[in-house]
Image: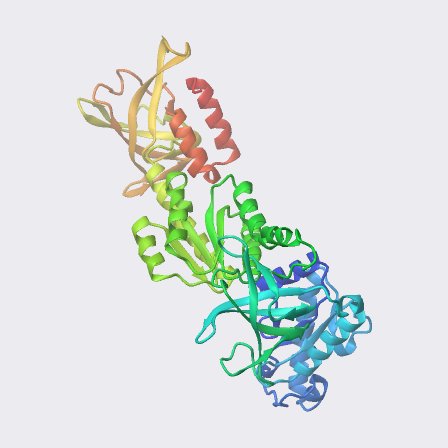
Amino acid sequence: VIDIMHGLEPQTIESMNMLRAKQTPFVIALNKVDRLYGWSEAKDRPFIEAIEEQDDGVKREFESRASAILLSIAEQGLNAQLYYRNKDPREYISLVPTSAHTGEGVADILMNLVGMTQKMFVDRIMWTPMVQCTVLEVKVIEGLGATADVILANGTLKRGDRIVMCGFGGPVVTRVRDLLTPRPLRELRVKADYLHHQEIDGAAGIKICANHLENVVAGSACLVPFKDVPYDLEVLKEDAMGDLNKLAKAASEVNGGLGVYAMASTLGSLEALLEFLKTSKIPVSAVNIGPIHKKDVIKASIMHEFKPEYATILAFDVPLTKEGELQAKESQVKVFTAEIIYHLFDQFTKYMADVRLEQQAKAATTAVYPAICKVSSPDHVWCRGGGGDPILLGLAVQEGTLKKGTPLCVERRGQKDPETGLQAYLDIGRVVSMEPEKGKQVDVLKAGKSAAVKIDAVTSIQYGRQFDHTYPLYARVTRRSIDAIKEFFKEDLSKDDWALLLKLKKQYGVI
């Protein structure tokens, strides 16, 4: 479905890509034509008749917006055309203008769907006795207990049949107690009197009454074993749990057990969520289906021991129970819920950005950016230090980046480090402030820039005693500072900065 007023949205492109990957033919509903300025309502009429009754201005606006959307679809590598101009539906996707609000074009989209199915899938839509049944929803109905709303696509279901379904705690094996359908012109979801059946042939929407349906997974298959094959029941138990087990195993194996906890309302929703998280490069450690309970929060809290930022639950179209909410506060587990996958991604991305900033703030004193400086002139030394006084002098950055808080050192000329056998260095102190202009302080000074720099000097260090203007000043990098740079500030360093960091690492003999 494409909104004619907004064009292609990210979720529309994602849907089209999924359909292309599965090689599934489809039509596109170009919805909200009634929002065109000046549109005259033609309730429930075919679009061709409705557009003929519109003013020329409305027709021009429609053609303009439709052409822009056709161009956007072409940019995605797909051929599309308005359905009444489409000469070859196998090569071009039909674009059907509709209005879900006033009904224009709804008959056209039904005609296109039915026509495409009858032409392209003759073999697949023919009835067969093999049962093909999918669970849509599980809910408790007063007077009936737990029931399962299913779509019977093929085959025959009978009262008393043994059925096998996927459950949260393992396969659910039960017998059909009753088969219910809504009365004519009623929806299955609407609570009303139901018709009772001994058996039903597909295709049909059915409400199944049976025992032990409380833990059945929505979106899973409902399987019927052959009565004359004794081992078929055990085979179907494995088949019923196959999709859920495969998703859970794949999620944890790919990421080595580290990642967020993903939840969705149905098996299909969970599959879509995992695929989206995979393309978004968000790791997943475990999955589940259904409302967020206390046990789910406890499982997610395990990540506090490994990567605290992943102690989160990403829940697509499922509610958070009261006990789950209390446990989340106690365990400090972040829970993100949304009815649209992209909103879930936005929430998690913002959270990770905040976590990143917090981690960077904590690591700021540890991380040391590489820098080489020199005293700009012997005349630019205003305070020599010593006895606890700071050193205040003019520094020019020759290479790298000098930041506030950077520890500086100079060579101990003529001395070797007893541990590494390399040139020995003397720590001077940390940069406290930098002023390139009077009264203007900065936190960062790039190569080629100069500033008056205040250094919180070690008590015994004094300019003119241990060093002078002929000594270069180096940023003191250590193994710990390099690790902090790699983990939290990697994207801030240029290629030249990395080259300088490698040079200083060798210079100091850092392993």
Farthest residue, direction left: 387
Q: Residue 434 at x, y = what percent?
A: 31, 36
Please say if 121 is above or below 298.
below
Which quadrant of the figure contains the C terminus? top left
Q: Quadrant of residue 374?
A: top left
Q: Is residue 96 visible?
A: yes
In the rendered view, does 135 fall on the left or right side of 122? left
Q: Quadrant of residue 426?
A: top left
Residue 270 higher or lower than 383, as above or below: below
Q: Name the residue located 48 percent from the left edge and 48 percent from the top edge.
A: 286
In the rendered view, does 85 fall on the left or right side of 56?
A: right
Which image quadrant is residue 479 in? top left
Residue 469 % position (x, y): 34, 21
Residue 168 in the image, given as x and y percentages of width and height: 49, 55
**Residue at 32% in and 53% down:** 327
386 or 335, which is in the foreground?
Answer: 335
